[in-house]
Image (cartoon, coloured by chain):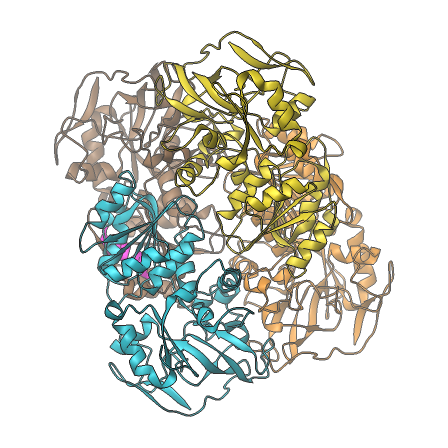
Chain colours: A orange, B yellow, C brown, D cyan
Amino acid sequence: MKALVYHGPGNKAWEDVPHPALLADTDAIVQVDTTTICGTDLHILKGDVPAMTDGRIIGHEAVGTVTEIGSGVKNLMLGDRVLVSCVTACGACRYCREGAFGQCLGGGGWILGNEIDGTQAEYVRVPFADNSTYPVPAGVSDDELLMLADILPTAYEVGVLNGTVRPGDVVVVVGAGPIGLSAITGARLFSPSLVVAIDLATSRLDAAKAFGADVVINNAVESAVAAVQALTGGLGADVAIEAVGAPATFELAVDLVRPGGHVANIGVHGAPATLHLERIWDRNLTLTTGLVDTYSTPTLLKLLTGRQIDAARFVTHHFGFDEFDEAYDVFSRAGDTGALKVVLSRTTTSS
Amino acid sequence: MKALVYHGPGNKAWEDVPHPALLADTDAIVQVDTTTICGTDLHILKGDVPAMTDGRIIGHEAVGTVTEIGSGVKNLMLGDRVLVSCVTACGACRYCREGAFGQCLGGGGWILGNEIDGTQAEYVRVPFADNSTYPVPAGVSDDELLMLADILPTAYEVGVLNGTVRPGDVVVVVGAGPIGLSAITGARLFSPSLVVAIDLATSRLDAAKAFGADVVINNAVESAVAAVQALTGGLGADVAIEAVGAPATFELAVDLVRPGGHVANIGVHGAPATLHLERIWDRNLTLTTGLVDTYSTPTLLKLLTGRQIDAARFVTHHFGFDEFDEAYDVFSRAGDTGALKVVLSRTTTSS
Amino acid sequence: MKALVYHGPGNKAWEDVPHPALLADTDAIVQVDTTTICGTDLHILKGDVPAMTDGRIIGHEAVGTVTEIGSGVKNLMLGDRVLVSCVTACGACRYCREGAFGQCLGGGGWILGNEIDGTQAEYVRVPFADNSTYPVPAGVSDDELLMLADILPTAYEVGVLNGTVRPGDVVVVVGAGPIGLSAITGARLFSPSLVVAIDLATSRLDAAKAFGADVVINNAVESAVAAVQALTGGLGADVAIEAVGAPATFELAVDLVRPGGHVANIGVHGAPATLHLERIWDRNLTLTTGLVDTYSTPTLLKLLTGRQIDAARFVTHHFGFDEFDEAYDVFSRAGDTGALKVVLSRTTTSS
Amino acid sequence: MKALVYHGPGNKAWEDVPHPALLADTDAIVQVDTTTICGTDLHILKGDVPAMTDGRIIGHEAVGTVTEIGSGVKNLMLGDRVLVSCVTACGACRYCREGAFGQCLGGGGWILGNEIDGTQAEYVRVPFADNSTYPVPAGVSDDELLMLADILPTAYEVGVLNGTVRPGDVVVVVGAGPIGLSAITGARLFSPSLVVAIDLATSRLDAAKAFGADVVINNAVESAVAAVQALTGGLGADVAIEAVGAPATFELAVDLVRPGGHVANIGVHGAPATLHLERIWDRNLTLTTGLVDTYSTPTLLKLLTGRQIDAARFVTHHFGFDEFDEAYDVFSRAGDTGALKVVLSRTTTSS
């Protein structure tokens, strides 16, 4: 089969690789019908993700069709169409018993396209298939469902729920890329009084408005801290969600919240930040970090099928599997191309 | 009357000052029968607390007797003996309505010995007296009760409750001074499986053992991270409580916890710390900071009167009011003197 | 002045009474500009509320203007226009310190129009005025604000928050009167996947649809249990909110929830219900009861001023103060008149 | 092999039955080394448990040795000694993903000795063996460990945690049989200020004292409500735990709690109770029911191995497998025999 293979920093190729085989009886092989590129994949290509080694297939998001199942798989049948989640879960370890599947100690967690071959391929082996896939519900397109493989549950769990967004809150989202827009989408579910988006790019702030931000702040132009203080009577925001993954944006998020506020970090960081404890030790702040656990995927599926989440609007570009290079190019130049999520499909040519 | 007056960094004097007067109808004047010195007072004398100005009386902990009450005070009578809490509360602002009295926006919070004259004096004006004092319960000594003015509620709320200590947890307390020992005392209430204390001073680690630490680690001698890893099967602690107030100890606390763990900062910090987001962004950590709110004071009073907390053992030295210099000296050289809390009383000479 | 005075079961009169006087320094006298009638007032007139005695003024909801203030009132000024909440709060007792103002032990709680004279009058004495009133915000009509005196915080706290409504939940509201419609309004803030309203009256079910119910069930016509089972794959609802106050509706609410579900009782009950423990002992249910505490009033004010709650649509009829008899008649025959909330104003004639 | 077989109400026999066979690849066969009798087994013998049919083996608690494992069992090996929990869990259904294993929709839950053959036998088939057994830890006797098969996690989760016992609380346990004593044991982990036990039998109240009750009330002799009011300044208990399973004791538990208090029902009920909503609708009560989920078993294992729970003292009598009749007799006449838990072992004769 063909797959997008990582060959060290800066190098990738859509090339022939062996068809995946079942390695454990709880594995399934899934034909990838649709996949997408994550910001994390760009980090991988920069060499930022140490577990990733030369020769491994990239990607951790897919919608596909089950083509083989191990004898220990209970809830899948050949031909089932499924969402392949970015997180796999053994289902039996301490963390899985607590619903913290992302921290699985039994061989799961975020391993696809990281510790094992991933989903940017014609077929993918999915470990612990019962706990790592979800049946495609009726009335939902693959494009929409694909947004539940990673960005929507990540932003919802790690940003919105960790940040404990509540009705009436002022919520600031730092960074208006796909994850930030997902955080806006998720925060809206709790009826905040104000959602504020901060970014350096006008195009992204325009997207933030379209996704439901009440106020947008270009912090290349104005002071985000001053603007949020002005919006909150000098007190600060109830919740700040970091959706970039850089020291400056994390530090900004901490500066934006009121005493008693929450800072929820979603961003993937490659460098340390400065934590101004001398300013915050007495402010009753709560700061959280997290990898998605996907415990919210069933909830988000209900909201998606009920049309309470609009996932389709994340998808700005379509490509065929033979167009991975172009897709990466469009996605990595999002500022210019306006790309949010690019979708690659077995049967599609670019749109 | 006499009081201990701050005269800029390094300077203080037990000197004559005017008797305090009621300024608001919700004030009370309390004769100070017993007071103590807090580690924060040492910070003040170093010039670290910007709100403190020349001429202000130091101190924010006391047990005393009500000698005057404003017309708006409802629940106190002349002659009542009361605990004066380090936190005063207007009772009506947004934060007070939520029980976050330490963040009071109505003129309260930690103001005694900081923004207004404090308790290291023969008399003290206590604002919002109804919400800022507690009647002395029967059967409890002033020494014991005085520990509820600051250190026990601070360690319990900001360390133990913010850290969400649960039965069976492995709890690490970084720093075994009075606040760290209070955190050990508070953590024990939740039946952790293991309490680990870390300090550089053998005398403090001995105290930690006496206060209930199961394991003590001198991190001048051995790696605390390695030791905690060894105790937890390589996973890390459930909760780490920072009870020092320095960048290194905060960073250590972050390094000590398991995925999904909690870091509760109690320490008063004067400098920023480095937060290694590149190591923790995906570990589902919760970090908290906080000033005490004293919402737990009624609970701690019940536990104190029921002898479920032993507060007397914090008090290592007694002095009279005319011995403030000696008391500060003994307290500030705790490593040598073995001082935990030093108590100064109207009627006592040194012991 | 004139006021609506209770004279034993079935008897009330709009009659001359003495002008209220300040009794405590924390009292305020408020000129009532607008008031309304609560379902609880009908209970009072039936003789169901034991604290209510002959000669007392009815009513616990108002918007008005401050005309006198005691010397201990800090945050109000003469001429301030305020919402008078149904719950007053001493601000200092154990329950008030925890935000459970409805359970105030210091002389507050629900006392207006119950233990003391109420708001269906030209003037009302409001105890603990600082903690029991809220400034009228700009851009909000008295009609709208009046809905925050009781029904909206009651339904939100006692129904929605006690019931822990979450995104994606199936929420059933039993009873579609003003409180039930308020519960639908409040539940919608959390993006449930489905809100189901149950009532016996078609007119109320129509109102429920208008207020945001996705499905309505007339349980005079069909089995509500069967219908909810059908909607939930046989499992039951996540949350059932009782908004009637009768044994049968409470028992129905218990029958409607899934294992692990919540039953939140809002209804005022005059008789015991049967709790089928033999059916629910092993179903992990949580059942809650409650009087409103009004801790959510600031949040609801934000949502009201931000137009995220539409409070105006509750008001179906307007009357002048000299039309109390007609207003009670219209409100008590809601099935015929379509009345939800009737508003009585100093300056209005009926509409 | 031999097993204790249920033959309709009142009838049971230790008789020859076929050796159990693996039915699913996730099954294990466990040789029962030690088992015990639960109060629920007495209910079964009265005919109260509808799922139980003639010919089925009784029992849902055991410590044993793995003798056969299905191909899908990942974490067990032949010869492993394990605790067999009363609850089995598929690990993949909605409820298992949330840790609510007792409500498993995938074929687990409480099925042993109820829906399938149980543990009062020489061998037992354990479904979903990975999720339903726990390795025997070093230094713990079978007797002690057996208490974690049901009563300790049941009382801890359904009584103590559902009741949200907190430091300083007044906790009342209604019923001082094995489950009530387990609730006392569990409540003590949270440092309540007062644990009150209520029972009709002096011998059980003596046991309650030995297990850590501060106050015992014989409600055949005195009014429990009056006694608890006297202990709490007229307010009522913070938490009441029902550990009997009768209408009168449930109703008593509701009467015992303060406004804002919690009633946690553990008892297995065969009849409805009366819920006096007319007294409690405005008291902010939380009532919970529940079957054990066993999510706390890992925590309790830590506390047991750390000697923070004394489980051995529950075991009052020992028998061999050929003495089931005598064991049931002793256990069912607990009032006379003083039996708490009776242990039956492969190799033991009565003690």
Q: Is residue C324 above or below residue B237?
A: above
Seen at 63% across and 77% down, the residue is: A26
Q: Nearer the viewer, residue B125 or C236?
A: B125
Establish if D171 lies above or below D246: above
Side of D306 relative to C322 (left or right): right
Q: Quadrant of the N terminus of chain A?
A: bottom right
The answer to which image quadrant residue B226 occupies is bottom right
The majority secondary structure of the magenta stretch comes to helix
Q: Which residue is located at x 50 percent, y 38 percent? A: A168
Magenta span: C245-255
Q: Position of residue C249 (x, y in %)?
A: 27, 54
Front one among A283 and C347: A283
Number of numbered discs overlaid on the protein picture: 0
Residue drawn at 80 percent across, 47 percent down: A336
Residue B84 visible within the image: yes
Q: Quadrant of residue C263?
A: bottom left
Q: Nearer the viewer, residue B76 or A128?
A: B76
**Does residue D242 appear in this view?**
no
Q: Position of residue D66 (x, y in %)?
A: 53, 82
Q: Position of residue B337 (x, y in %)?
A: 64, 31
Res. C101 image quadrant: top left
User: Which quadrant: the C terminus of chain A?
Assistant: bottom right
B252 or D201, which is in the foreground? D201
- B255 w.r.t. B175: above or below: below
| Residue C95, above or below C142 | below
In percent of the image, x 53 and y 46: which residue is there? B187
Residue A280 percent across, percent down from the top left: 64, 33
* Magenta stretch contains residue C252: yes
Residue B104 falls left or right of residue D198: right
Residue A142 sits inside the magenta stretch:
no
- Position of B323 with respect to B127 (left or right) is right
